[in-house]
Image (tube, grey):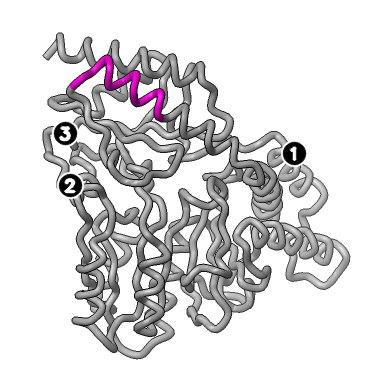
């Protein structure tokens, strides 16, 4: 692969993460719930990793719940909050959320467990705060949870988390923030945020797949969705994935060290902006979706009017460039992104929109190659059309 620009789908595990996981599989294979020496050693490794994740989040270790992935963490936050309350209640969220939140809310509503109030986004993808106020007031006393993500996985658009959280606090409403694309890429201090639940995923910051994180503020109650054991302080049953958790701890420590110097993020943002300028210069009718809003430094979503994203992605892949048409878990769908449609992006542009996402390991050369190949592939597809 000449240029891997699909880092919002997953990042490559760091060498030290792989080494730590191999060591845990070979030497730390005890069950952390056992009381003998092998189990105690495994438990110690799990708790050390939990402390590392807590440092990355700006949290207390006891507040960190380890799950099987970001999707499970979101489900635990949403369904676990509903189960802790009596009767069907209202969930307030947006159509621009990741499917882990959006489809979870739809499913809970279809099963009669909740009602969903959808708050619109503006053309830039940012929540309409006046509409949020109206939804909270219209459902006063009935809202179980507000769920709005921090950084959009498809466009990188940032939501005003502090403003949303302050509105929730003023009304005594719990706030869940899907920070899967944020954590490990931007400094995080959940203790000083007006947020109650935060989700993250290890493989977005160079850790392993299959390990998710849910931060639960002290006093916030969620009932387990995976039942069958007292693990994770009775919030998620099942024997812990020791090797995966150990790898997550190592990845969290590496992220903390990288985040200490803002130069890395500034370099990434400059590289992303240069890439966009190069693409727009070569394809003048291309559109940066969400480009007018504040965005995460690593994400660019570019629409190519009149093209099909799938055709462009296949051609790019043949030429050694990896990108995506949106969320990885939606790949294979021929429908335009629900996120882009919810932003009001015309279908003609949404159908031809491609997400390019970088990591702290991405090089300028990769982005130079990618910009050249995008221009060549777009030209080729338009000639054939």
Q: In front: 222, or 293?
A: 293
Q: Position of residue 349 (x, y in %)?
A: 16, 33
Q: Position of residue 21 (x, y in %)?
A: 71, 45
Q: Is residue 198 visible?
A: yes
Q: Residue at x 52, y 75 (%)?
A: 227
Dominant SS in magenta: helix
Q: Nearer the viewer, mark 1 or mark 2?
A: 2
Q: In front: 164, or 18?
A: 164
Residue topped by disc 3: 349
Q: Residue at x 82, y 72 (%)?
A: 35
Q: In front: 140, or 90?
A: 140
Where does the magenta region start and end?
Answer: 273-284
Question: Callout 1 environment at 10 Å: few (<14), some (14 to 19), or many (20+)?
Answer: few
Q: Is residue 1 visible?
A: no
Label 1 to label 3, Cα distance in Å? 44 Å
- Residue 61 vertical position relative to residue 23 in the rendered view, above or below: below
- Residue 372 vertical position relative to residue 209 in the rendered view, above or below: above
Label 2 to label 3, Cα distance in Å? 10 Å
Picture quadrant where residue 335 is located: top left
Q: Position of residue 380 (x, y in %)?
A: 22, 10
Q: Verify whether residue 280 appears in magenta.
A: yes
Residue 204 in the figure: left or right of residue 121: right
Q: Which label is found at residue 252?
A: none
Q: Which label is found at residue 341?
A: 2
- Residue 264 vertical position relative to residue 140 in the rendered view, above or below: above
């Amino acid at each position: 692969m000449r240029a891997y620009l699909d880092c919002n789908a997953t990042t490559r595990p760091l060498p030290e993460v792989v080494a730590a996981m191999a060591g845990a599989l070979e030497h730390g294979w005890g069950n952390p719930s056992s009381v003998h020496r092998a189990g105690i050693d495994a438990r110690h490794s799990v708790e050390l990793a939990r402390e590392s994740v807590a440092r990355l989040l700006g949290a207390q270790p006891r507040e960190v719940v380890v799950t099987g992935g970001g999707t499970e963490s979101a489900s635990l936050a949403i369904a676990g909050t509903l189960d802790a309350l009596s009767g069907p209640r209202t969930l307030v969220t947006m159509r621009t959320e990741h499917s882990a939140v959006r489809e979870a809310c739809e499913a809970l509503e279809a099963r009669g467990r909740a009602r969903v109030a959808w708050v619109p986004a503006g053309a830039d993808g940012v929540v309409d705060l006046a509409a949020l106020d109206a939804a909270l007031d219209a459902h006063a006393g009935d809202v179980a949870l507000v769920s709005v993500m921090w950084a959009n996985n498809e466009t990188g658009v940032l939501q005003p988390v502090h403003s949303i959280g302050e509105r929730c606090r003023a009304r005594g409403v719990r706030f869940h923030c899907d920070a899967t694309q944020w954590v490990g890429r931007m400094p995080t201090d959940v203790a000083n945020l007006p947020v109650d639940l935060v989700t993250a995923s290890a493989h977005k910051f160079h850790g392993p797949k299959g390990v998710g994180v849910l931060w639960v503020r002290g006093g916030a109650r969620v009932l387990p969705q995976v039942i069958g054991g007292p693990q994770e302080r009775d919030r998620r049953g099942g024997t812990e994935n020791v090797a995966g958790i150990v790898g997550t701890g190592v990845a969290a420590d590496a992220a903390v060290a990288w985040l200490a110097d803002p130069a890395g993020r500034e370099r990434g943002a400059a590289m992303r902006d240069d890439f966009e300028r190069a693409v727009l210069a070569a394809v003048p009718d291309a559109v940066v979706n969400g480009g007018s809003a504040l965005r995460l430094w690593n994400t660019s979503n570019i629409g190519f009017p009149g093209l099909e994203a799938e055709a462009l992605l296949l051609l790019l892949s043949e030429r050694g460039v990896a990108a995506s048409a949106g969320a990885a878990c939606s790949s294979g769908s021929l429908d335009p992104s629900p996120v882009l449609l919810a932003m009001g992006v015309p279908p003609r542009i949404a159908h031809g929109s491609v997400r390019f996402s970088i990591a702290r390991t991405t090089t300028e050369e990769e982005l130079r190659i990618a910009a050249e190949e995008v221009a060549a592939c777009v030209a080729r597809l338009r000639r054939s059309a």
